[in-house]
Image: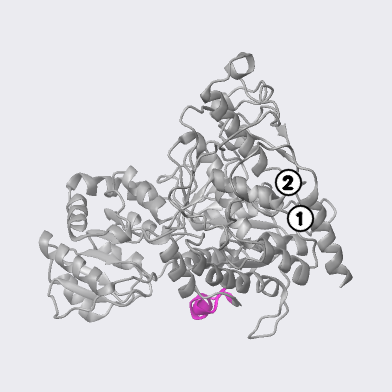
Amino acid sequence: MAEDEEEQNHNRKLEDRHSPPVPTDDEDDVSVYYDADHRGLSDRHGDLHEADHASSFASDSSSSKAPSMASMVSGELVTSTTTTASDRRRRKVFHGLRKLFDETTPLKKKLKWMKRVATVKDDGTVQFDVPGDIRPTNLDFGNGVVSDHEVNGEEPLDVSDYQDLPPLQIVMLIVGTRGDVQPFVAIGKRLQDHGHRVRLATHANFRDFVLSAGLEFFSLGGDPKVLAEYMVKNKGFLPSGPSEIPIQRKQIKDIVFSLLSACQDPDPDSNIPFKADAIIANPPAYGHTHVAEALKVPLHVFFTMPWTPTSEFPHPLSRVRQPVGYRLSYQIVDALIWLGIRDIINEFRKKKLKLRPVTYLSGSYSSLHDVPFGYIWSPHLVPKPKDWGPKIDVVGFCFLDLASNYEPPESLVKWLADGPRPIYVGFGSLPVQEPEKLTQIIVQALETTGQRGIINKGWGGLGNLAEPKDFVYLLDNCPHDWLFLQCSAVVHHGGAGTTAAGLKAACPTTVVPFFGDQPFWGERVHARGVGPAPIPAEELTLEKLVDAIQFMLDPKVKEKASELADAMRNEDGVAGAVKAFHKHFPRKTSDSDIPIPPTPPVRSSIFSFRQWFGCSPFSHNYQI
């Protein structure tokens, strides 16, 4: 009871601390995305998703109480004595950002400013705008020079990165669908080859898959089918409406509260003791950084979609039109996710980890700046951004060899031999809202273009035909690395693993994204000229699918797909991931064989607006 009172007093002090003056505002207090007890969106004030809400950084009014901006911006604002509408707009931008990233600002006000900055759309993505006349040069808070933010002195990954480490007990905390888990099975097997003991902790649905690969399995909470249904409906990690919040929060809590056991409990089958020496995780595990802090072990994060701020493209879960806002989009999305799970994380820290609660931004991305990240995609498809430093690696796609032991059914072998290469159409483990209608569109598109097709039924229940079609083969399950080599082109949801398999097989690709990073991969495929523009799942029509198939049948597109496949052929993403892990694992001391974890990063109250806008990292910071 005393601990509860102490925590309440501590949090109350944080909330009651004096915050910098803010402009007066005639509006009523706005709704918060999650209200105080996290029951959902506030009924009293309405929700955050109304289309008429402004999604710019500008507030509606300003006053003389606002701090002078003359010392905060460069250029004409410093010397001009005349205040223009453009000047006022810029000042409002800075004021909103200052409030967002000020730890002393009460949460309610912080959420109010968050609403001014960003709008959570009906599809679960985040939209925000930077005023059109804002340029990086206007975001200079000192005498820094705007640069292209290129990082020099990158350390290549080579054989020397395989340190002479003692055998480690490594736990992999992986949340997601089969496509999210599969690359980590491949990485885990390779780590095992290097003498490490590897436990892959993921959802119970994948127990047999993990064990059959020769890895240890430990069950995490959460159901990937429920997660997939949620993300298909909401297009991402953010809920699109009040009714979705309890579903996602229950899944997250089940996952988070199972993480500590995954790191230290004995093997559930053999009862052999286990204590993690290192943690590998993907971001949707949410609590991995906190477990690593409690256990004082190194953490390495790997992911199949961009999660590190860059000025080269926006966060995949955001909608940002202006390049000047790309880098900031990562912080906005991260802050919104954190606001929705902060109480779960702090309950987990207090009850399970015996750690103090963390405040607003100290528990989000800002606490990860010293954690190495590895990105699981081909640098030939998406090169490493110039503003990513040496602790961030693009390791390549990580393929798990399933084809070598696969024996296709005789009916499939015969059907393939009876005609030209087919087009594959499938959406993996994603639930489809109207499977009968979608199946009809697929069949009609194949018939219209004169193509044969393989339809993967998947979790979505595709393929219920009124009568059999000789140009259509219905498939339950088949390794992509075998199947796509038999196909002329592929149509799929755009998961990173499926995209990788199609490109490796030199298949022109049409991406029909449902959520998350899938639109990002669809855009990358289109930018490389190996597929048409992505078609959002809810916008797929017969006409659009016919056009997409015809695009893929163009010999020039096939030629580009072959060129990309040739470039990817020499990549070994699994080796790259293992090298990155060894490279960034803390070095041994001279008198001990036990690697020492890095010192936890010191959380600073200094925030560089210029850095988040992709400007020079060497300019002055603005202390808040």
Q: Quadrant of residue 123?
A: bottom left
Residue topped by disc 1: 597
Q: Kindly identify the residue that appears in the image at 71 percent across and 61 percent down.
A: 290
Q: Which mark is residue 103?
A: 2
Residue 31 position in % (x across, y down) = 58, 55
Residue range in magenta is: 201-216
Magenta segment includes 539: no
Element marked by disc 2: loop
Residue 447 position in % (x across, y down) = 11, 65
> Considering the image in quadrants, where does the N terminus appear?
bottom right
Label 2 crowd bin: few (<14), some (14–19), many (20+), radius 10 Å: many
Q: Is residue 326 visible?
A: yes
Q: Is residue 485 above or below residue 113?
A: below
Of 224 and 406, the residue lying toward us = 224
> Considering the image in quadrants, where does the C terminus appear?
top right
- Of marks 1 and 2, the one in the foreground: 2
Of 59 and 403, the residue lying toward us = 59
Residue 178 position in % (x across, y down) = 45, 70
Q: Kindly identify the residue that appears in the image at 48 percent across and 64 percent down.
A: 180
Q: Quadrant of residue 191?
A: bottom right
Q: Is residue 158 visible?
A: no
Magenta segment includes 203: yes
Answer with mark 1 or mark 2, whichever residue precedes in sequence. Answer: 2
Q: Is residue 550 above or below residue 245?
A: above
Of 77 and 525, the residue lying toward us = 77
In the rendered structure, which amino acid carries the disc numbered 1? Pro
In the rendered structure, which amino acid carries the disc numbered 2? Glu
434 on left or right of 585: left
Q: Kindly identify the residue that appears in the image at 71 percent across and 78 percent down.
A: 265
Element marked by disc 1: loop
